[in-house]
Every structure is written in structure tokens, then in C-alpha cells.
Amino acid sequence: MGTFIESGYFWKGGQTLKVPMELFKLNRQRLCEALRSHRTLPSDSFVLLKGGTSEMRYCSDHEPLFRQESFFHWAFGVIEPDFFGAINVQNNESILFIPRLPPSYVAWMGKIKEPDEFKQIYHVDHVYYVDELDKVFTELVGKSKLILVLNGLNTDSGSESKPAHFDGIEKFHVDKTTLHPIITECRVSKTDLELDVLRYTNKISSEAHKFVMLNIKDGT
């Protein structure tokens, strides 16, 4: 089943639940509030997150089913690969950085969306291309401000979140330790909108189990 973004909703189609983009906006707001309460953190810091990357199956040109990086999806609700996202901690402003796709992309995957289209789809404040990361951060962030990147250990899997990186980031002050525990704590505490999603998934899962048990037969 595909995933769609329709009129500000994250949606799997059919009669599935439409998740409002307000859910992700509220998550960003909560994260900024938590970061602003951090005593030693400058209020004019920026968060920088990297989304999941597109991959090929070994040496073939086949792309496996893409699943978004969890922290990035929690903050932005983006379904496409190869995005970056930034958040101004001081005022909650959000920025998406989208890949600049080649014209040949149209022949195989259809129309290439413009930055303004992604701005409307994901309800963010600004959209630029990934190759503009250095330029945008130089203009908006400045060398004196702090960039918070995600770097921490998942104790269940033993895998680490790899910090976002772009050519030129070494010019800025980068913090790799503060963000992970704070954003993880934010994800633990669910909003009412997130609880609605959990109730829906629990209901659908229960209905599926009930259907199987009611229709099971001997010898099958």
C-alpha cells in the first residue's frame, strides 16, 4: 500500500487513518520548548536532522521499499528519501532541504515537485535544495550560533544515529551530545494526536486477529 500526502495529511489510502501534519508541527514545537529549557543551550540554536537515504539492491538498479528514519519522520512527517530538516529552536521555524532531482527523473517517476509544493504539503516555513545547505546555514544561522545534530545509541539494537553532515558544516559550532536524549524523551511522551494514531493501530490489529480466529477451521 502506498503512502500519500493529501491536503495536509499523512495517509495510506482507502479507509486508513489520515494523520494531520499538525501532529508533526506539534512535535517540533515540543522539541523546541524542551531545548529552550536546557540551561546551557543558547536559545538561538538550530536543530539539523537527516532523513533516510535511497539505496539500490546490491549492484542492481532496483530500489528496496523505502522507510523513513524514525526521528526525521517524527519531526517532519516526510515520506521521501534524501531530505534534510532544520528547526530554529528560538521561534520553532522549520526548514526542509529537498534533493535536486535530474530532469530525467520525470520519465520514470513523474512530475518533479517544486520547493513551494513541498512547503504546502508538509506545512513547513521554508524549503530549499540540499545543495544549498551551506549557503542557507551561513545566511540564517551564522558562524556564532550552534547546530544540534543527532548522535546517540539505540540500546535495543546497538546501532547509533549518525549525525547529519553537509560540506561546510565544519565552519559552524556543532553539538553532537545534547539533542539525542532530549528528542528521545519527547518521543516517549505522546500527544493527543499521537494517541489517536496508537488507538487506531491497536483497533485495526485487534480486528484483524478477531477475524482470523473467527474464520479458522480444522485442517487448514
Image: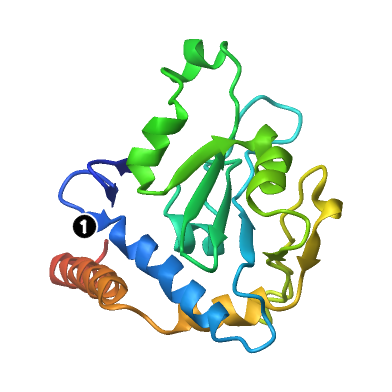
Query: Is 206 in front, or is 215?
Result: 206
Viewed as shown, does residue 207 lie left or right of 187? left
* Quadrant of residue 81 within the rendered picture: top right
Q: Residue furthest right?
A: 170
Q: Residue at x 64, y 67 (%)?
A: 45
Q: Is residue 1 visible?
A: no
Determine whether 86 is above or below 135 in the image: below
Pinpoint residue 109: horizontal percent, then vertical percent. Answer: 46, 20
Pinpoint residue 56: horizontal percent, then vertical percent. Answer: 67, 34
- The residue carrying mark 1 is 17
Q: Residue at x 45, y 55 (%)?
A: 76
Viewed as shown, does residue 61 lie left or right of 143? left
The local secondary structure at tag 1 comes to loop
Quadrant (top left, top right, bottom left, bottom right) of the N terminus: top left
* Amino acid type for the residue under numbered disc 1: Leu
Q: Residue at x 85, y 52 (%)?
A: 171
How many residues crowd mark 1 within 10 Å: few (<14), some (14–19), many (20+)? some
Pinpoint residue 162: horizontal percent, then vertical percent. Answer: 74, 61
Q: Residue at x 17, y 72 (%)?
A: 210
Query: Is 99 in front, or is 87?
Result: 87
Query: Is 200 in front, or is 174?
Result: 174
Pinpoint residue 101: horizontal percent, then vertical percent. Answer: 58, 23
